[in-house]
Amino acid sequence: SSLPIPSGPAQSAAWLAGAAIGLYTLYVAVDVFLLAFLGVLFSALIRGAASVLKHRLPIGDAPAAGLVVLTLFAVTVATFWWMGSTVVTQAQSLWKSLPSALGGLTTQLRQLGIPAEVLASAQERWSNTSSVLGQIGKALLSTAGSTADVALVLAIGLFLSLQPTLYARGLVALIPSTHRGRAREVLASVDETLRYWMAGRLLLMVFTGTFTGVGLWMLGMPYAAALGLLVGVLSFIPNIGPILAALPALLIALMESSSKLMQVGLLYLVIQSLDGYLLTPMVNQKSVSVPPALDIAGLMLMGVLFGTLGLIVASPLIAVAMVLTQKLYLEDHLGDEADIDD
């Protein structure tokens, strides 16, 4: 049976009161909720890899999740040991060179007769963009000053991964018994969506980061490793992230020569075209395909309301909202079985 929909003044008032309390609680502790959702995403990644592992080895949920966590830890340590110092050094040099690159661009544009007020507006926009890049980089890569946040995300992800059924049963227990079967179905759909979303996003991050870094290295660009890492990290934010990541590379290329600018621009165009027209549609076959306009609008709204954390979690939250809309409203309330991806 479908989940309960409020009917009658008393039930409607109760639902509205509950919604108001929930929204107020969300407003007061929004950072905690967003970090908790990041933990859920981390858990989805672990459980997705663990489910693949269980099909190949005769082990249970907890051992498979533990093996995945150990593998992720080993890969992370090995990667930082292999190229960590190079990336850090390049990233620091890149960040220091961006103001001079922007100054060179401003000089060239002024020589072309671009009005001063237009250049001032562009510099202000770049300042805002660099601020966003810095905030996102700190949120995703730094550990200093955010140990508690990182620990919260990791703890939630690990506990959810090791005992997923325990928490699922607890959540379903909050639903009236006559509707628990439907609640399990909806929860399973949300879980599947997040697992495929995370797996697909990780694949795209690795692809775009690796090929961008290798491509820039082949073109003889400085800071190739740092720029490749920047593209990979920001690719977690669909649509907007890759555009933000391309700006520093294009500025550095412009300092080299106009031909280098064209080569780097073409490289980014090819990689993002493969991402947008080939890889992303393949990934979305197993997950919810979020329309780009809706995704961008959601990203901007979440960024304005909740800052960097809002930008990071906006896209998967929109995917979850689309699943809930399909299951609870289109199917249960309207009786429409049409898939929202059609």
Image (cartoon, grey):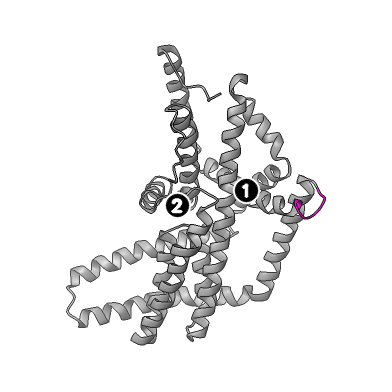
Give the label on residue 272, or none.
none
Label 2 crowd (10 A; few <14 / some 14-19 / many >=20): many
**Percent x, y for residue 1?**
56, 23
The kind of residue tagged 1 is Ala
**Percent x, y for residue 123?**
29, 68
Q: Residue at x 60, y 42 (%)?
A: 191
Main SS, magenta region, reads loop
Q: What element carries label 2?
A: helix
Instruction: Give the extent of the magenta segment.
Output: 54-59
Q: Is residue 322 above or below residue 173?
A: below
Query: Is residue 247 or residue 182 the one in the foreground?
Result: 182
For residue 51, say whether it is visible. yes
Asked if the residue under mark 1 is in contact with the one under mark 2, i.e. CB atoms within 8 Å, the reply is no
For residue 226, say whether it is visible. no
Q: Horizontal placement of 49 versus 250: left or right?
A: right
Q: Earlier in the sequence, mark 2 or mark 1?
A: 1
Q: Residue at x 46, y 41 (%)?
A: 339
Of discs 2 and 1, which sits in the foreground?
Answer: 1
The kind of residue tagged 2 is Leu
Could you tell me which quadrant the C terminus lies in?
A: top left
Per the model, the C-alpha gap separating discs 2 and 1 is: 19 Å
Q: Mark 1 points at which residue?
A: 44
**Percent x, y for residue 183?**
58, 29
Q: Residue at x 50, y 79 (%)?
A: 215
Label 1 crowd (10 A; few <14 / some 14-19 / many >=20): many
Q: In which quarter of the image is residue 206?
A: bottom right
Q: Horizontal placement of 173 versus 127: left or right?
A: right
Q: Mark 2 points at which residue?
A: 311
Q: Is mark 1 on a helix, strand or loop?
A: helix
Query: Is residue 101 or residue 22 the one in the foreground?
Result: 22
Q: Which residue is drawn at 49% across and 82% down?
A: 222
